[in-house]
Image (spheres, rainbow, N blue to C red):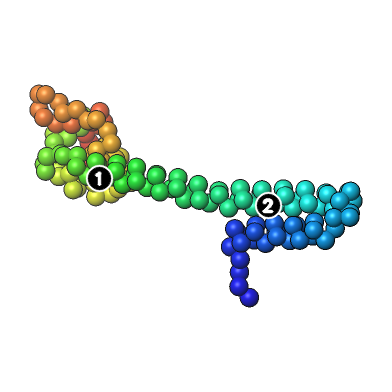
Amino acid sequence: MKSLSTEGKITAIRKTCRRESQKTTNMADDEQFVAACAKISNGEQLLSEAYELPKQDLDSVRREKLAFDSLTKALSQVHFDSTIKLNVGGKIYKTTLETLRKDPDSLLSSMFSGLYDLKVDGEDGAYFIDRDAELFR
């Protein structure tokens, strides 16, 4: 048995309602028939609305994906020097951007992801981190 699409189901319901209303023209005043047609009409409306919701969600997800891809592309173009100097509690550490980003869930990876506007210290050219140098090691 072939499955009907949502639009096909709506069309079938409309045809059934028309066919039944043509058969019972003499019973147009019958309250049950009028109530049934009203329920069918409401059902048609609800089916039509339900059919549109996934389309709208899909369009929204596509727009979000485009925005995410655009942001990802922009962030991939953020440039840091290959060697990074960190001033942690007055002690200078040198490392690579690759090392800082090795653990994607770390604070250092997040700091050097390009999402934040980091300022280099004018004196020593290092990124200042206000923490105890001994604990940082």
Amino acid type at circle 1 is: Lys
In the picture, measured across the screen, residue 80 lies left or right of residue 115, that is left
The quarter of the image holding the N terminus is bottom right
* Residue denoted by label 2: 44
In the picture, measured across the screen, residue 11 lies left or right of residue 83, that is right
For label 1, count other residues whose C-alpha is less than 10 Å away and answer few (under 14), some (14-19) or many (20+): few
Amino acid type at circle 2 is: Glu
* Residue denoted by label 1: 73
Q: How far apart are marks 2 and 1 (CA)?
A: 44 Å
The disc label shown at residue 38, or none: none
Residue ID at (40%, 48%): 62
For label 2, count other residues whose C-alpha is less than 10 Å away and answer few (under 14), some (14-19) or many (20+): some
In the picture, measured across the screen, residue 82 lies left or right of residue 21, that is left
Residue lying furthest bottom: 1
Viewer-nearest residue: 6 or 109? 6
Viewer-nearest residue: 105 or 129? 105
In the image, which is nearer the foreground, mark 2 or mark 1?
2
Task: Work out whether residue 32 can be spotted.
Answer: no
In the picture, measured across the screen, residue 92 lies left or right of residue 65, that is left
Task: Work out whether residue 23 can be spotted.
Answer: yes
